Structure formats: C-alpha cells, structure tokens
C-alpha cells in the first residue's frame, strides 16, 4: 500500500508505513518504505533515520543519494556534498551515481553556487545521445540551473532536449519550454458564450514552473 499510494497520496502512504513499522520494524524493506513515505511528506529527519536503519540491516549503498538529499532537506547542503565525495558513491550503479550528481548540484544551488552546480551536472551522461531512465531529469536539472544563472538561450535548448527524452512525463519540461517561448494555454473547456455575456475573459494560464 505504501508503494501504491506514494505518488498519488503521500499522506496515506505515510499512514500505512507507520502501521508497517509498528508491526515489523526489524525488516529492512519496511524501514526503507517508511523512509520513502516520510521523504515524500518532507519529514526529512524521520526519513534519514529510517534509511540509515535500512542501510545498517542490508549493508547496501543504494540509499546513499536519497540520504544525502535528506541532508539537503534538513538545511545541511555541506553534509550532502561531503556524502557526494564519499567512497560509497563509487559503489553505486550508474543510475545511483547520476542521482548523486543531481543531489550534489542541488546542494551547490542551496549554497548559492550556481556556476558550480552547472559544472557538477556536466558529465558524459549529460552529453550522451542515448536515452536512459535518468536522462530527462538530468537534462531538466541542467536546463534549470542554466536558467537560474541567466543563460536563457542555453536553458531553452536543454529544456527542449529534456522534452525529447521525457517519455513518461516525469518532468514539466514541456511547460517550462512553452513558458520561455511565451506560449499561453487557453482552457478549451471554458464557456465562450458565457464569458462574452458577463464580459469576462477566457481563462488562461501561462505555463508554470515546478521545482
């Protein structure tokens, strides 16, 4: 139930995770699920404690990136960067190493180091034309960092590349790209006749931004 509800109802997932933890707190998978449920609800201290417990039980380094991101959530970007340089990172698979790079870049941005965040994201994985599960998020993060640094034209190019690789809609790159191009979306379900009668305008919204 935690896995099923995590994306659509994080509060519900958190509730189920607390029940599971009461029933089977010595099971590593339960501790990990509790960590992800707490993380989804921005309870970063609780999430970090559960992830650490799961790691002690399994000896696995797979949770290292999300543990570092919890440190960011707790306002400790320096600790996240320290973890990004730890030996554990070399034991991660490619997906985990890319995730760690994303966390490290986020920590740089937390510290106001935009140029360093951009450099952190520059990697063979970013330059590759091969589309992997992490490609869209990596390109999106790079585009967002470029935009934050005022490099709008480059940002537009990378948002476009993110759109090309975002096969499952995991980012709002298309909305960000439309916003940079000045595209506005009109509500096709609006009552045109009703709007004209009361003098109102058609509802429209410029493409938004998601962190």
Image: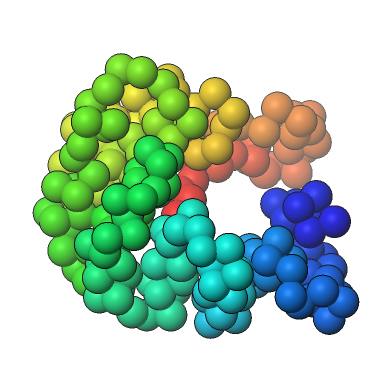
- Position of residue 58 relative to residue 140, above or below, is below
Query: Is residue 9 visible to the viewer in this orientation of the structure?
Result: no
Residue 208 image point, x, y percent: 49, 46
Query: Is residue 20 visible to the viewer in this orientation of the structure?
Result: yes
Task: Residue at 41%, 21% (x, y): give it.
Answer: 131
Q: Quadrant of residue 192 in the image?
A: top right
Q: In the figure, is residue 7 to the left or right of 69?
A: right
Task: Residue at 50%, 39% (x, y): give it.
Answer: 171
- Position of residue 156 relative to residue 63, above or below, is above
Which one is nearer the viewer's eye here, 155 or 197? 155
Q: Quadrant of the image for the N terminus?
A: bottom right
Q: Quadrant of the image for the C terminus?
A: bottom left
Q: Quadrant of residue 117 in the image?
A: bottom left
Task: Residue at 46%, 67% (x, y): give it.
Answer: 67
Q: In the figure, is residue 181 to the left or right of 64?
A: left
Which one is nearer the viewer's eye here, 74 or 53? 53
Q: In the figure, is residue 210 to the left or right of 101?
A: right
Scheme of colours in the image = rainbow
Residue 157 image point, x, y percent: 26, 27
Task: Residue at 65%, 37% (x, y): give it.
Answer: 202
Residue 6 image point, x, y percent: 73, 56
Which one is nearer the viewer's eye here, 83 or 204? 83
Residue 80 image point, x, y percent: 32, 69
Q: In the figure, is residue 115 to the left or right of 3?
A: left
């Amino acid at each position: 139930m935690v896995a099923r509800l995590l994306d659509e109802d994080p509060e519900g997932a958190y509730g189920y995770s607390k029940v599971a933890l009461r029933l089977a707190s010595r099971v590593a998978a339960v501790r990990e699920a509790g960590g992800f449920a707490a993380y989804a609800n921005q309870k970063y201290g609780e999430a970090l404690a559960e992830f650490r417990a799961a790691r002690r039980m399994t000896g696995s380094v797979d949770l290292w990136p999300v543990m570092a991101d919890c440190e960011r959530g707790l306002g400790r970007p320096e600790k996240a960067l320290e973890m990004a340089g730890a030996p554990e990172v070399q034991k991660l698979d490619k997906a985990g190493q890319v995730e760690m790079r994303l966390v490290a870049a986020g920590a740089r941005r937390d510290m106001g180091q935009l140029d360093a965040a951009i450099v952190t994201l520059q990697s063979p994985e970013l330059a590759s034309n091969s589309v992997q599960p992490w490609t869209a998020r990596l390109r999106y993060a790079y585009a967002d960092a470029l935009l934050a640094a005022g490099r709008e034209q480059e940002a537009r190019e990378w948002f476009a590349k993110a759109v090309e690789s975002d096969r499952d809609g995991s980012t709002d790159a298309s909305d960000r790209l439309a916003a940079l191009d000045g595209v506005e979306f009109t509500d096709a379900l609006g009552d045109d006749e009703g709007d004209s009668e009361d003098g109102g305008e058609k509802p429209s919204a410029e493409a938004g931004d998601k962190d």
